[in-house]
Image (cartoon, rainbow, N blue to C red):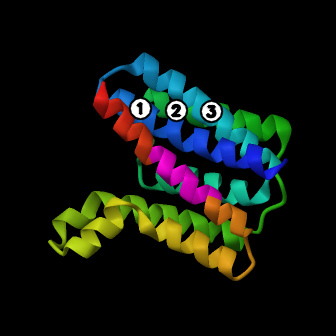
Amino acid sequence: MNYFVLGLLYILSGFFMKLSDDSYDENDNLYLAIVFGILCALASGIATVFNADAAYVFFGILIGNLLAFKIDGIHHVITVVIFVLICLICGIPHLSLVILLITILAALSDEIGHELIYNVTDNKFILSFFEYRFVMKIVIFLLAFFGVLSYWTFLFFILFELSYVMAGLVLKKD
């Protein structure tokens, strides 16, 4: 898969993920949450089956969120089912369990920190660190820096994150 298409899939995945979450959480619109969740599953699923680095990122996010009990609505369940079906039907690249575990733990740390840090400290740096989920960003950067993942993966992950934030701004305007 060429890098332009892969980057676009990361962008679409982040954008639709946030639209799905906020459609349900902020706007109480289950229908839109499901539609955006399906679009997110398609984008991330296609990236996952064609690129091992994307598989580490998206499986890390998925399993980290499962372990943090963040899959908490029917829209999430439908998204997960479609993502998993795409992976089962199309197959996934060979993955190292160690690298997968690292990305899972990074995503899990971000989710737990994001939810609990406000109960632990008032430190603005630490609050911002977990508000914007920097554990996964740092881990993806380090994996790319040490040659485990492609530098493109780090760039695409940042684009994923930026599109996630932009989608939140789009919904706030409505």
Give the residue drawn at x 53%, y 44%. 14
Seen from the viewer's position, the closer of residues 171 and 108 is 171
Q: Residue furthest top?
A: 31
Could you say which quadrant of the image residue 87 lies in?
top right
Q: Is residue 61 left or right of residue 45?
A: left
Mark 3 and mark 1: Cα distance apart in space:
13 Å
Q: Please name the amino acid that badge 1 sits on.
A: Gly
Name the dominant secondary structure of the magenta segment.
Answer: helix
Placement of 54 over or under 101, stated as above or below: above
Location of the C terminus by quadrant is top left
The verdict on residue 9 being magenta is no
Q: Residues within 10 Å of mark 3 (few under 14, many from 20)?
A: some
Residue span colored magenta = 156-164
Residue 41 appears at what percent x and percent y? Answer: 62, 35
Q: Residues within 10 Å of mark 2 (few under 14, many from 20)?
A: some
Give the residue drawn at x 19%, y 71%. 120
Read off the residue under disc 3: 81
Q: Is residue 108 left or right of residue 142?
A: left
Placement of 92 over or under 120, stated as above or below: above
Placement of 13 over or under 74, stated as above or below: below
The mark that comes first in sequence, 3 or 1, is 1
Read off the residue under disc 1: 73
Residue 84 appears at what percent x and percent y? Answer: 68, 39
Q: Which mark is residue 77?
A: 2
The verdict on residue 159 being magenta is yes
Report if the CB atoms under discs 2 and 3 are less than 8 Å apart. Answer: yes
Q: Please name the amino acid that badge 2 sits on.
A: Val
User: Can residue 78 be seen here?
Assistant: no
Report if the CB atoms under discs 2 and 1 are less than 8 Å apart. Answer: yes
User: Can residue 40 be seen here?
Assistant: yes
Q: Please name the amino acid that badge 3 sits on.
A: Val
